[in-house]
Amino acid sequence: MDLSIGELSRRVAVKVPTIRYYEQIGLLPSPPRTEGRQRRYGAEDVSRLSFIRHARDLGFEVDAIRELLSLSARPDQPCEPADQIVLRHLTSVERRIAQLTLLRSELRHMVEECRHGPVRECRIIQVLADHEQCRHEHGKVG
């Protein structure tokens, strides 16, 4: 297999600048180049980029992906470190879900209290202007 960066991009559905970024930060190894300085990719690159894309789709951060890739390169090792990475990520996801649930509740409450009058009486504007009027403590989600 001898793919250009454009063909790799199409096969794995990852944008070319993202592929270059992954190479820059070391998630993808720098590929060999032709005499014309074009990058050339093989089957291992397709597999590795697919792994990275799937991990990103699942919300894993770059450092976690780096650790998982390192683990995958040692297939005879115990998978407990991978479990720990996923459990950390799961805890983070569950925390964000809880924050989003509170956020949804607060937004629904704001809309339900809206009386569709003039802006000076708008409950939504009032609550946004005064955090003390919120029913729940909420912060940045993410």
Image: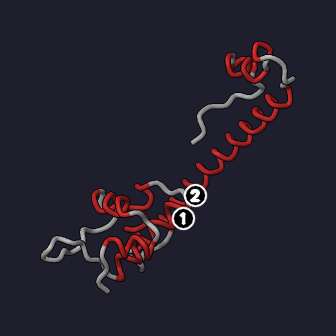
Q: Quick one: 1 or 10, which is closer to the camera?
A: 10
Task: From this view, report whether residue 131 is shown above or below residue 61.
Answer: above
Q: Quick one: 43 or 120, which is closer to the camera?
A: 120
Decide if residue 113 is on the left or right side of residue 107.
right
Q: Quick one: 119 or 72, which is closer to the camera?
A: 119
Crowd band around label 1 with a 10 angstrom C-alpha radius: few (<14), some (14–19), many (20+): few
Q: In which quadrant will I find the C terminus?
A: top right
Decide if residue 64 is on the left or right side of residue 59.
left
Task: From this view, report whether residue 4 is shown above or below residue 83.
Answer: below
* Residue 53 marker: none
Identify the residue shown where x is 74% and y is 17%.
126
- Quadrant housing residue 74: bottom left
Task: From this view, report whether residue 63 is shown above or below residue 122.
Answer: below
Please provide percent x and percent y for residue 34.
17, 77
Q: Quick one: 27 or 79, which is closer to the camera?
A: 27
Identify the residue shown where x is 73% and y is 20%.
127
> Is label 1 in a helix, a strand or a loop?
helix
Crowd band around label 2 with a 10 angstrom C-alpha radius: few (<14), some (14–19), many (20+): few
Task: From this view, report whether residue 73 is shown above or below residue 91.
Answer: below
Identify the residue shown where x is 85% and y is 25%.
113
- Quadrant housing residue 38: bottom left
* Residue 83 marker: 1
Residue hosting label 2: 87
Q: The disc labelled 1 sits on which kind of residue? A: Asp
**Total numbered circles:** 2
> Is label 2 in a helix, a strand or a loop?
helix
Q: In which quadrant will I find the N terminus?
A: bottom left
Please provide percent x and percent y for residue 31.
24, 72
